[in-house]
Amino acid sequence: MPRPPILPLIEWRRVFDSGLIYAAWIAAGDNRDHAQKMEEMRRSQPLDAHVMGLLGALARPVHVIAIAEDWCGDVVRHVPVLEALADAAPNLKTRYIARAQWPDVFARFLTNGGEAIPKFIFLSDQFVECGNWGPMPADCRELIARGKACGDGGAARQKVSALYAADDIKRTVVNELLALIDIASSTTP
């Protein structure tokens, strides 16, 4: 039996260093309306006291590479959550890259073969990949997959919209991102 192809190693520090910090990414974007909306959402994103405590006490730095472009509705919805967490965590550093900037990186994070964004890649303080998130919460990804499987993507998108409306403070996204931050900052298995 032939060996599967081995993907080339990614120099995560190099990818991270090539990215833009949030403020520069927002300033460089093409959609001013989306930029303004993301800024408003970031500033108004509620974080519970226990979340603030966890973020303020990260044992080690965590680096997050966000593959994001400002035209995308899911980017507009979820980047502000990531940045609200970063605002509360001195040890959480984010950088933004476009899909075309690092196609070999993006190709590893397709969603069911599709080019969905955002994708957040969580790296340890040593730039070891520890997990990824996106383009939407797990329950929403499952609905979309079920919609594709049964041939009713429209109904699936309606259900996703209902889930988004039911979680207007994005508690699900906060919890999923916190779990990945916790893994990337771990000092013990």
Image (tube, helix red, strand yellow):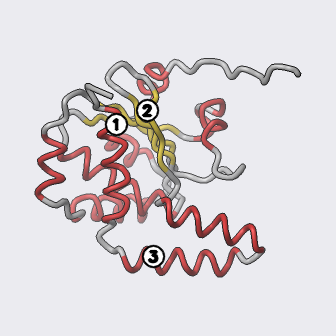
Pinpoint residue 70: horizontal percent, then vertical percent.
49, 54
Q: Secondary structure at mark 1?
A: helix
Residue wearing tag 1: 183
In the rendered structure, find residue 130 and report the number of the disc placed on it. Answer: 2
Residue at the spot x=71%, y=20% of the render? 6
Pinpoint residue 68: horizontal percent, then vertical percent.
50, 47
User: Would you place residue 116 above or below residue 95 in this image?
Assistant: below
Pinpoint residue 161: horizontal percent, then vertical percent.
50, 77
- Is there a contact, CB below 8 Å, between mark 1 and mark 2? yes
Distance from label 1 to label 2 (Cα)? 7 Å
Residue wearing tag 3: 163
Q: Nearer the viewer, mark 1 or mark 3?
A: 1
Distance from label 3 to label 2 (Cα)? 27 Å
- Amino acid type for the residue under numbered disc 1: Ile
User: Would you place residue 31 above or below residue 157 in this image?
Assistant: above
Labels 1 and 2: the sequence-earlier one:
2
Left or right of 14: which side holds 8? right
- Amino acid type for the residue under numbered disc 2: Cys
Residue at the spot x=34%, y=43% of the render? 22
- Is there a contact, CB below 8 Å, between mark 3 and mark 2? no
Q: Secondary structure at mark 3?
A: helix
Labels 1 and 3: the sequence-earlier one:
3
- Amino acid type for the residue under numbered disc 3: Leu
Q: Secondary structure at mark 2?
A: strand
**Mark 1 crowdedness (10 Å alpha carbons): few <14, some 14-19, many ≥20:** some
